[in-house]
Image: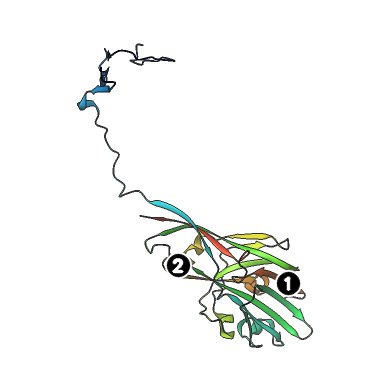
Amino acid sequence: NEDGSITQDTYAIDQPFEITFARDEWVRKIKHDDKGNFVLFVDIQKTTVEAPPSTGGEQQTATNIFYDLPEDGEVLNRFCTDDWETCRSTPQANVNWQDIEVASIGGGSFPDGYLIERTFLFFDTSSIPSSATIKSAVLYVYAGQFLYGNTTIHVAQSNASTPLTTSSFQKFMNVSGGSTTLSLPFDWGSINIQSNALKWIVPDGITKLVLIHDNDLKDITPFEQNDVVIATGEDGAHRPYLEITYTVP
């Protein structure tokens, strides 16, 4: 046609042919020779395409899952008869839970004193290149059987070491990097890590996080039990995990 296009529903080739384009196109001729070959004749001067300005190379995006390590655990202060603020800042009961498949976040006020529970999580993110830029991260946790009262929990940055000890109780920054309210037992919940907390993800290293209760984070004295139980790294089917998206040059 007048645009230089050739259309045909079916085309049986039983002899050599040659098509010459009348218009000044970069494809000048198509030939089918007597050996069964298709040959395209092009105007080489019209095949050059100007490349867009360089942006320094394209970045590659990857999304990977990182599971909580079995070194995780719960560190708590219970039977604390001091004032609430003192109980939050100083472990008294010298108790920590490790190497079990569940951990608690929360606590409350009881006749024998305050209870405060914090759960520390560790993720091996060493496979993320050190040159990577973290674009997003979501923490997934699996609620256990017991959910009492206010079930809002927050993720914060930890600087605890393993194995956990009673002093790990205080080894975190009391700043929320995202929160969720767990409402159903035996169900998954997710925390979208806020943009200001993405720096807590450690490329080529270990990412250390802690889950703390809403009352604990906000320094609100509880008058009832507020408790969340989650699966830990020892639970192969339901252990917490991070879904991280990052770019590399």
| Relative horizontal placement of residue 108, taking residue 36 as reference (left or right) | right
Q: Secondary structure at mark 1?
A: strand
Q: How many marks?
A: 2
- Visible residue check, residue 206: yes
Q: Mark 1 = which residue?
A: 226
Residue 86's x, y, as percent? 64, 85
As drawn, the residue found furthest toward the right would be: 111
- Nearest the viewer among 196 and 247 is 247
Residue 27 in picture, x, y percent from top left: 27, 21
- Answer above or below: position of 97 versus 249: below
Q: Residue at x 77, y 81 (%)?
A: 110
Look at mark 2 in the image and give the residue it sits on.
Answer: 202
Q: Circle 2 sits in a helix, a strand or a loop, which is it?
A: loop
Rendered view: 29 above or below 200: above
Task: Residue at 29% x, 45% y: name it.
Answer: 54
Display colour scheme: rainbow
